[in-house]
Amino acid sequence: MTLPIRVRTLKIDDRDVSAREDETILEVARENGIDIPSLCYLEGLSAVGGCRLCLVDVRGVPRPVPACVTRVEEGMQITTNSERIVKYRRMNLELLFTEGNHICAVCVSNGRCELQGLAQSFGMTHVHFPYLYPQLKVDASHERYVIDHNRCVLCMRCVRVCDEIEGAHTWDVMGRGIEAQVITDLNQPWGTSDTCTSCGKCVHVCPTGALFEKGKSVAEMLKKRQFLPYLKLMREEHV
Amino acid sequence: MAQRILIDPVTRIEGHARITIHLDDDGIVNDARFHVTQFRGFEKLCEGRPFYEMPSLMARICGICPVSHLIASAKACDAILAVRIPTTAIKLRQIMNLAQIVQSHALSFFYLAAPDLLLGMDSDPAQRNLAGVLQSHPQLARDGIRLRQFGQQIIEWLGGKRIHPAWVVPGGVNEPLTASRRDQILATIPEALRIIQRSLDWFKRSLEGYREEIQSFANFPSLFMGMVNEQGGLEFYDGYMRIVDATGAIVADQLDATRYQDYVEEAVEDWTYLKFPYYKPAGYPHGIYRVGPLARLNIADHCGTPLADQEWAEFRSLQRGSVLSSFYFHYARLVEILFGIERIAELLNDPDILSDHVRALAGPNNYEGIGVSEAPRGTLLHHYQIDAQGLITWANLIIATGHNNLAMNRGVLQVARHFMSGTAITEGALNRVEAVIRAFDPCLSCSTHAQGVLPLHVQLLGSDGTVLDEVWRG
């Protein structure tokens, strides 16, 4: 017997909304047509609250909280677009740009990149922090795919999709803080990975041009993510 | 007392440069140098990037002739793929390349050179610009703008945008041409033809007025190098290299463009960032050669389109042998615009042009690729090496303006000797020193693969190095 799902009522931007108790603020907001930006979140994968772009204010909580990993509670009063929140999100986005080498003009994902799209929607005309210009490598050892660490924002969608959907767990993260980097297997060239099934899911969930198909030129990498909720649903049904 | 005149920055050219003129104790010009003062380092920054990115990355060298870099780079990448790209892709690339030639030549002639030609070398510098031309010769200025628009519009219609289109890719182009686009382009041909014919008529009539400039603007014997097709005709996309001398005699023919290292070598001087390519068998600096519109019309046996062939014959009758004065670069540019427009129409009327097969797909099959094409300013060469993963390990570019470096330097000296004497710099003399550079239409940002605003600075220095007179422009 399944337990009855309890309903919570709360306010988002002064609008009364109701939600299932197991939902997050982000899910409820989107169901109700309230826009909260996000980058690491992807429907069909577990949420990790890594990018901090979905920050919202909850009355009574001193710090902003990430909407993608915060469950709704009865009587919550949430603000998604206060001046403070917009400022923090913008700051986090700018920091993402400073930590990599994001050159949209010559990127395979130009015009189709989630990071670029966020910058446009935030009206980000320049970055207030010094760029770090890290010296990062491109690994093109895989037969079909390439990882360009210069464009990686460490959203870990690749890590999650590989683990949760494909079940291969080829991808993981190495290092801490600003040194962190996604790796394949035991930090070896992707082409030498024993676990990679070459399924390409990581490439298609990657929000930027960090993961792409070999042979794609500028602006040619079209990522298809429609498969994800469908795959997830089918797997759950057949487990 | 010996002196040095410094022109810094040089104006109405593409990039940063300065000129120094050295006078001896009697105030006679004894040396002149054209210094390119910018540095960019594209050959270095592309290292480690996937070769598929190269056309778009290298196109960023220039906002005026990005298509030329796209073409040469894509050809180098085709060589890495080791594929024969579909013939329709070749024709589509040719159309875009010619549109680029038309718009770049229109920019050089109407925007940068016309103020000198129409308003006079000695006219007030405050008026000597495109705005001045618009006031005094509105029809001609409008024609120039229209021609440039014609070329740019074709680039946009084919590639999605006017500057840095990503349409030209290794293996071909990434989208076929639609019938409606083709018809759209064809509809613009008649007006462009009328404009260029009108401009040619006017320019030919006015040549008489520039006798002194024709005589002194880098007018000396040299070799000429460029690409010709299998029939020896004018070619911009792919063909053999040919070198002719001042008498018009062919010095070397049917040279494989990708074996450029057999016959071209680059010398370096410590006073400029621009290298000095020279014809290897003749040595440095005797192997001085010129490239670009003047060279192309000198080396070709014909153009290959009816109207341009007539103009070419008339052009070549200016002089027995090769046409030597660099002032005629301007004239040659107009003839090439005419050829470009005619040839675009021919290519668009090709039954194949709408084919969907426009891209050959392959991985990296060669570890090295060389792509050579004719850019507006002359022969453009991209040479890449990759590792087993397809990442760039080494790149070398030789840009049209670089080929002309020796000739530009000699031209500056010739003009300075002809028009300058004494310690004061007259406005007209200063402008002529710049104008000889403009005749070559150098793109310094390209040639040093460097970046910047383009102005000019002339300094007159004493033998002890003191600055006696100085003029800044910019």
Image (cartoon, coloured by chain):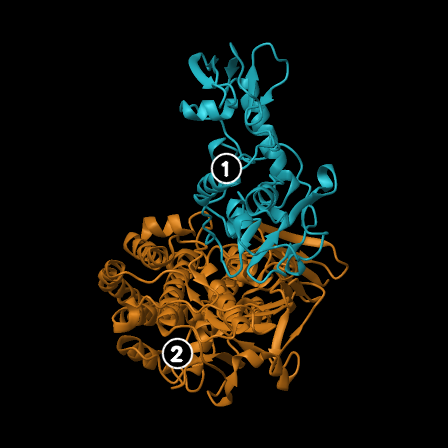
Chain colours: A cyan, B orange
SS assignment at label 1:
loop
Residue at 67% across, 64% down: B22
Q: Chain of mark 1?
A: A
Label 1 amino acid?
Gly
Q: What residue is shown with label 2?
A: B234
Q: Position of residue A171 (x, y in %)?
A: 64, 47
Q: Position of residue A145 (x, y in %)?
A: 56, 57
Q: Position of residue B444 (x, y in %)?
A: 56, 60
Q: What residue is shown with label 1?
A: A44
Q: Nearer the viewer, mark 2 or mark 1?
A: 1
Residue B361 versus residue A41: which sits nearer the camera? A41
* Residue A121 versus residue A238 in the image, above or below: above
Can you see residue B368? Answer: yes
Residue A219 versus residue A47: which sits nearer the camera? A47
Cα gap from disc 2 to disc 1, whole angstroms: 59 Å
Q: Image quarter for residue B337?
A: bottom left
